[in-house]
Amino acid sequence: MQLAIPHAPRKVRLTQVPGAVGRLVRGVVLGLAAMALFGAGAAWAGRFFVEEQGFAARAEEIEGLVVTTRLPPPDARDGAEGALEVLYTFHEREHSVSGVVTYAEYAEGLGRGAKVKLLVDPAVPDRPREAGFARARATRVGLLPWGLGLGALVAMGLFAWETRRLWRAEVEPLRLGALVWLTPDGPLPETRAEVSFPAHYFRQDVKHAVRARVRPGRAPVRNGDKVLAAVVPRQPGWARVIDQDLAKELDWVR
């Protein structure tokens, strides 16, 4: 095997690195699947947001009277929810409704006959909400669009990060890295998984110790006991082993 390796910077594309495009495609597929799930969640959240905003816009505040309260056990009330049965008059019609949700800590201070503020939607007058609980919930719901936007930005950022990482790990060493003959510190492991191993090389009679990464199931370009590798420019303590398939794809073999 005769090598014909051009000087750096060498023309290397991501599509020339066996397996790199497949890894990128798998990342895209997983990203699209995650975005589909995210989109479905966003659609549900969007409808919920619109409904909550519509209720807040239509609701009228009235005063009701507590009939009974339903509370969790005393040792479980911190941050928990309770329920009220209330009497109220809305548009000259009396209503008695149970299951009006509120904070348990607030409900435990309400006895029979206590006054409570309610928000009532004129379109559904028999489904009131306790005013304090409903407004706190509306505040949290108001943050929902910002959370969805942030989630989309994070997803795009992760994809960009993975693409950049793949470029730096697979292409940059081949384009810019110093090509050296590595001597492994021991026999290379017999495995089809990607492995790293300790090795060293000499430059101007100076020994440099590195860890080398070899792609799964690939036969390295050898020179006796040595293997050809490219030193990673940004991490001089790491090297990427060049296998025979890659050398042929890059036309480094004559």
Image (cartoon, helix red, strand yellow):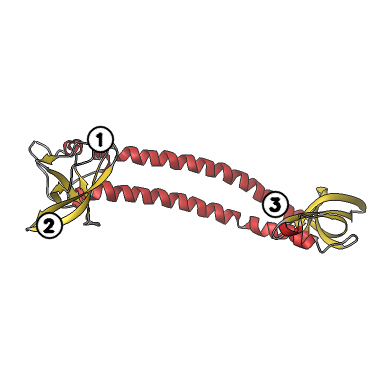
Q: Nearer the viewer, residue 223 or 174?
A: 223
Q: Nearer the viewer, mark 3 or mark 1?
A: 1
Q: Which residue is mark 2?
A: 207
Q: CA distance from mark 2 to mark 3?
A: 68 Å
Q: CA distance from mark 3 to mark 1?
A: 56 Å
Marks 3 & 1, CB-CB < 8 Å contact: no
Q: In x, y percent, where is residue 82?
A: 77, 55
Q: Nearer the viewer, residue 188 or 205?
A: 188
The type of residue carrying mark 2 is: Lys
Closer to the N terminus: mark 3 or mark 1?
3
Residue at left offset 38%, top offset 50%: 160
The type of residue carrying mark 1 is: Gly
Q: In x, y percent, where is residue 97?
A: 86, 50
Residue at left offset 10%, top offset 54%: 202
SS for callout 2: strand
Closer to the N terminus: mark 2 or mark 3?
3
Looking at the rendered image, the quarter that the N terminus falls into is top left
Q: Which residue is mark 1?
A: 217
Decide: is 37 above or below 80: above
- Locate residue 248 relative to residue 20 in the image: left or right: left
- Locate residue 152 relative to residue 171 in the image: left or right: right
- Locate residue 6 relative to residue 14 in the image: left or right: left
Q: Which residue is mark 3?
A: 52
Decide: is 74 above or below 152: below
SS for callout 1: loop
Q: In x, y percent, where is residue 23?
A: 34, 40
The type of residue carrying mark 3 is: Glu
Q: CA distance from mark 2 to mark 1?
A: 29 Å
